[in-house]
Image (tube, rainbow, N blue to C red):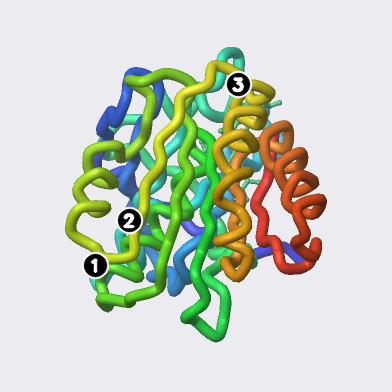
Amino acid sequence: MTEPTQPATVLSVTDLTPNVRQLVLLPQRQKLDFLPGQWVSLKLPISPHPPLNRAYSMAEPASPSGELTLVFDRVPQGSGSNYLYRLQAGDTVILSGPHGKFVLPQPPGRALLCITRYTGLVPVRCMLKALEAIRDPTPVLLVAVGPAEDELLYHFELLSLAVSRPGFQYLPLVAPTEEAAVALVADMLSPLLPQKSKAVPLLCGTKAFVHPLRQYLIEAGYQRKEIKIESYG
Ligand SMILES: Cc1cc2nc3c(=O)[nH]c(=O)nc-3n(C[C@H](O)[C@H](O)[C@H](O)COP(=O)(O)OP(=O)(O)OC[C@H]3O[C@@H](n4cnc5c(N)ncnc54)[C@H](O)[C@@H]3O)c2cc1C
């Protein structure tokens, strides 16, 4: 059975950092009912048949208007992300979804330990916005690594959230490669982990970042099934 797809109109294009772009899309047929952390599959007409499938997480919770906010980095020689960089307001993309199980743990209430690299922050930012919208008091530590200082996504928004939302801690880090990011996060976490042992870890980013850190958390005493991950690349 083929999955249902629909066209969506690009409403706006905004650069968030030198190498990260936001697209706001409006599905043309049916509003998508999605949970924070879920993603859509874009069917990109790069080869005539079949289209190139690329997944992108929603950066904003579902809104009454039905708009979808997607945020992606430009991967050098990446055919999907470079195609998206050529889109302009008024263009159309085909998508399906929502998909995915990387969502806030249920029942809510347990502290969260969110660890992301670069655009791996996107689904977690959506979760944080959803928690903020209902003034949910769940304690959150967000460790967000960027490849350079000017590539730290949502940096000022998160700094300001750390001031205004009790229980939200934000630890921004910069590391040029995934390997360096893993080492840095492990270093920063080791003194914190004993206090965080009741927190639910949520990890998102490329496999080279997420998988070694999941292993690190398992060695620190977490059960594999307790650790929620979204990994790709
Ligand atoms: C569930 C899911 C959700 C995703 N959500 C997002 C999102 O919100 N934002 C986003 O930018 N991407 C997201 N991705 C990745 C996205 O689907 C593409 O893989 C990415 O844009 C690269 O595609 P490409 O064709 O340009 O590069 P490809 O030609 O497929 O090259 C990918 C290679 O580039 C490297 N790389 C660098 N940055 C990325 C990156 N962001 N994702 C994957 N590989 C990368 C990897 O080492 C990988 O081997 C998600 C993937 C999945 C599976």
- Viewer-closest of 79 and 198: 198
CB contact under 8 Å: marks 2 and 1: yes
Q: Report the side of 198 relative to 133 (left or right).
A: right
CB contact under 8 Å: marks 1 and 3: no
Q: Position of residue 140 (x, y in %)?
A: 43, 61
The picture quadrant for ligand 1 comes to top right
Residue designated by label 2: 26
Mark 1 or mark 3, earlier in chain: 1
Q: Position of residue 63 (x, y in %)?
A: 28, 68
Instruction: Give above or below for 35 relative to 206.
Output: below
- Type of the residue with mark 1: Ser
Q: Does any atom of ligand 1 lie closer than 8 Å to the CB of label 3?
A: yes
Q: Report the side of 155 relative to 146 (left or right).
A: left
Residue 28 is tagged as: none
Q: Quadrant of residue 181?
A: top right
Residue 101 in view, yes or no: yes
